[in-house]
Image: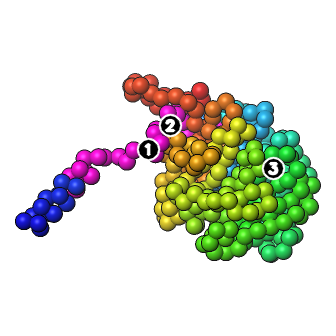
Amino acid sequence: MKKIMTGALLMAGAIWAAEQGWFPHEGGLLKYRVQIRFGEEPDTMPEGWKFGRVSAVAVDGSGEVYVFQRGKKADPVVVFDAKGKFLRSWGKGLFGNPHGMRVDPKGHVWITDNGDHQVMQFTRQGKLLLTLGVKGSAGTDDKRFNRPTDIAFSPDGKFVYVSDGYGNARVMKFTMEGKFVKTWGEHGTAPGKFNTVHSVAVDSRGTLYVSDRENNRIQIFDAEGNFLKQWTHLGATQNVFITPKDEMWIITHRNNIENLTYDTLAGRIMRIDLGTGRILGAMESPGHWLHATSDGLIFIGSLTGNVFRWYPGWLEKGLGADEGLKPTNQ
């Protein structure tokens, strides 16, 4: 009798699971629409240009959108207005392998080049202002990186943090003028150790949130690198972005194996409560990089060769006869 009841319960459980269909969105569905080919539809770039793999996207204070891409059919940095109209480009021949990009409070554009082991600061027009690291030379000292990934800025504007994260397993702190301050981290799984430091972000209090991607966690530190806590429920996080109002967004995957196997295709955008780590909402999106603007837009740089522009809105019914006639840039 016990075996019969157990079998019946298992059967009922299987039927229940099958009837559930799609897994609900953690924290509730984020109700956004998407422009899936920002910068390419409508196409205003020079003739013959197109994106290769887009590793990063960033937006400056004027609303201009910077796309950092790896293809040979366009310059590495391509700049658009907020609607996707081509404005300018730069960076040809400067980078080994584009990876990360951020814009500091003064409007300077910072990049990480994980091919040539460098971090570089530029003007909005592409003039080189500062270089950290030795081109083509990987190392573990305070003057060299080993495939750096991301950059973040202290809220007082005095320091820049670099996640030196593919070859090395550390976070490095510099003054904004490029003077080395300190470093922490090494390979491992214990608190304060890392396995692929893929992203770093800083909140308004100066607290650091570090994506320890291959360890499937986000580690949290004070400004001096002292471990505070960790979040292990958010999967293998590709990128972390915190707005000036301390609104936290991530692009993440269920775990590191899913991320690598699907080549970032199975990702989710999540809104996170900064104090608790609670997921406030989620929606599907491929993606490697994320930037959220003050007017409610979310830009995703995707290794599929796309920039996704997400904007608030939700269809109450299908598009019908109008579907697919032209790209939307609302």
Secondary structure of the residue carrying tag 1 is loop
The residue that disc 2 covers is 30
* Label 3 Cα crowd, 10 Å radius (few <14 / some 14-19 / many 20+): many
Q: Could you tell which of marks 2 and 3 lies nearer the N-terminus?
A: 2
Q: Is residue 164 above or below residue 127?
A: below
Instruction: State the residue position of label 3.
Output: 154
Which residue corresponds to the image point at 9% horizontal and 64% vertical from the top-left?
4
Occupied quadrant, residue 229: bottom right
Query: Label 2 crowding class (10 Å Cα cut-off): few <14, some 14-19, many 20+?
Result: some
| Label 1 crowd bin: few (<14), some (14–19), many (20+), radius 10 Å | some
Q: Along the horizontal axis of the image, is 101 left or right of 234? A: right
Looking at the figure, which quarter contains the N terminus? bottom left
Instruction: Name the residue that disc number 1 marks.
Output: 25
Residue 279 in view in this figure: yes
Residue bounds of the magenta highlight: 14-40
**Colour logic:** rainbow
Residue 268 vs residue 136, the one in the foreground: 268
- Residue type of the residue flagged with mark 2: Leu
Callouts 2 and 1 close, C-beta under 8 Å: yes
Label 2 sits on a secondary structure element that is loop
Q: Where is residue 92? Give x, y as percent.
A: 80, 54
Residue 5 appears in which quarter of the rendering?
bottom left
Could you give the CA–CA distance between mark 3 and mark 1, rounded to whole angstroms?
33 Å
133 falls in the magenta region: no
